[in-house]
Amino acid sequence: MFAIGLTEEFDDTVTWVIPAGQVPDGELGAEISALPAPAVAGEITVLPRPLRRPARVLLAGIGDGGWRAAGAGIVRALADDEHAQVVLPSGLPEAAVRELAEGLWLGGYRYREAPKPPRSGRVDLVASDISSYVGVVDEARAVARATWLARDLTNTPPSTKNPEWFADQVVSLAADRPGLTATVLAGADLERFGGLLAVGGGSVSPPRFVELSWTPAGPVPHVVLVGKGITFDTGGISIKPREAMRLMKKDMGGAAAVLGATLAAAELDLPVRVTALLPLAENAIGAAAFRPGDVIRHYDGTTSETTNSDAEGRLVLADALGYATERLTPDMIVVLATLTGANAVALGKRTAALYSPDDALAAALETAGTAAGERMWRLPLPADYVEYLRSDIADRHSSPTQVHSVVAALYLREFMGEVTSWAHLDMSAPSWAEDHDLELTKGATGWGARTLIRYLSALHGGQ
């Protein structure tokens, strides 16, 4: 990650960035006053000043409190190796500085394997008293680092990213971090994971199940985060058409987000116990691929009839939830999954669907998502729709053809056991951006990592 610093000293040999509406004294102020002020958050007006200092000034639009968008606009207007100083208004709230730093880092993201090298410039935030901003910039760095990781993992090509590779990344990232423990199950240890074995059965890359635990001293609530980890999804025997398969390297975006959030909880030393569960499989086509019509026995011993091998995510999540409720005694469970494409029709590309029977948990996640810049909309869990899950040959049907997203959430509810405080975020659409969009860069967005970190931080703060 490129550098962001705090300073109380102006340096007129570097580029200055001045928020719209803030006019300095003297000649520079007169020049800025003569320009049309950018009104939209993230909009940048460039003022060249040859043979003067500073030689270049950027006027940044803030809009209606859009500091995160402003940060993204600023970093995109800078050269990769440029040094700039952002002149902060006097008395700027800490939350605004945190959003500005997040926007700078998130807007400046570049995939680690991209042809262009990573940015090497520096942005200093200039204020008369920087002491109050040190903590929020550190928080922004942890949030950005988690999001960058989730983006990197999701952007990684499927020729590299298989379940074993992903599991190895988790083990490596958890190594030498006090309080973090990573456990990987494979082979015979997956005997009870019938959904995971079925979905991964058609691939030459066998499935893995990863448990990553952050256990601080004297933990308070125990939050279990479950992330769908399909490293590539062909649809299996119910094969996807070419265009629908184009972006299926992103089908592990939920696992990437919960991984990033758990690592951030450790980095920020949050006194909240967090366990991330990552069921990892490649849904491929092969002689051992599971078939439409198969009955699958899950970790909790119950069975599912499936008539669509492209409804695979819920099958691996069912095993993870059975594992969580039997072995971990969670206080709450939050599931992140690129589960269905149906939500995009109603909610668009920037909004995830939220399902939860717990009003307090749903409200906490919505608040965290709003603060993080990751929108969600709560949808119902109608009791009469449970009938769609009825099967004549198994405990339930995993892939009925009616109301796809809602019924998928109801299906996951079947595996929550006695846990009543749970939420499912269906985030397939917002997990990918087709172009730069505010703090998002083209490609994987890392959606959910920021929300989860805010949620965990607020949960700690509420104790």
Image (cartoon, rainbow, N blue to C red):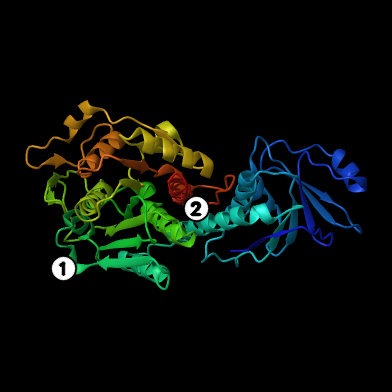
The structure residue drawn at horizontal position 40% and vertical position 58%, both measured from the top left corner, is 259
Residue ID for mark 2 = 443
Query: Label 1 is placed on what type of residue?
Result: Ala
- Where is residue 112? Give x, y as percent: 52, 65
Q: Nearer the viewer, mark 2 or mark 1?
A: 1
Q: Would you identify the image quadrant in which residue 37 lies?
A: top right
Could you tell whether 238 is left or right of 379 in the image?
left
Q: Secondary structure at mark 1?
A: helix
Q: Answer whether labels 2 and 1 touch (C-beta < 8 Å).
A: no
Q: Would you identify the image quadrant in which residue 140 lies?
A: bottom right
The structure residue drawn at horizontal position 39% and vertical position 54%, both measured from the top left corner, is 272
- Where is residue 328? Give x, y as percent: 25, 55
Residue projecting furthest to the top = 384
Name the quarter where the N terminus is drawn: bottom right
Residue ID for mark 1 = 188
| Earlier residue among tags 2 and 1 | 1
Q: Nearer the viewer, residue 243 or 284?
A: 284
